[in-house]
Amino acid sequence: MYKLVAVALGAVVALASAPCLAADNAQQDKMKACNAKATGMTGDARKEFMKTCLSADAAAAPAAPMTQQEKMKACNAKAGDMKGDERKKFMSTCLSGDAAKAPAAAAPAAAAKPMTQQEKMKACNTKAGDMKGDERKKFMSTCLAG
């Protein structure tokens, strides 16, 4: 009799804990989905997006499309340091929602990050080529400054 009660009690505890495990998995799934949507975002824009995404109701999040303001914010974050025509073209593509073109255009933003001093030195040395003496010094000084 005691064994039957113990087995029954164990089954009740196992069944009672199952919804808790499912809830944890749902939160993990939500985190994965939000991380995937936040690709390319950095800094405060990413923090704000993740906060909004994770706090959104699970049923409402997929159904609600991004507002124009949210699109603008996300595209600005992805555009990074782009300038001029490159930025205009990227923003136009990004805001129109053309997913196939937008991520490819974001790649130059990552390449535009500042070079380290060592990287500058290497690049300038390559550009200097066979220069010698004062000509090389002047070139290297200009190259490393800019």
Image (tube, rainbow, N blue to C red):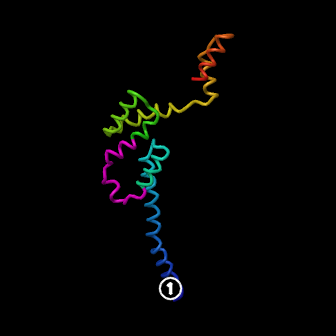
Residue 98, percent from left and from top: 33, 37
Q: Which residues are magenta?
A: 54-74
Residue at left 33%, top 34%?
92
Mark 1 crowd level (few <14, some 14–19, many ≥20, 10 Å Cα):
few
Residue at left 49%, top 77%?
13
Image quadrant in which the C terminus is located = top right
Q: Height in image: 100 above or below 70?
A: above
Callout 1 amino acid: Val
- For this rendering, which residue is in front, 29 or 117? 117
Q: Quadrant of residue 143?
A: top right
Q: Could you tell me how many numbered marks the image carries?
A: 1
Q: Quadrant of residue 87?
A: top left
Residue at left 64%, top 28%?
118
Residue 44, percent from left and from top: 48, 47
Query: Quick check: is 58 in the magenta stretch?
Result: yes
- Residue that numbered label 1 is attached to: 5
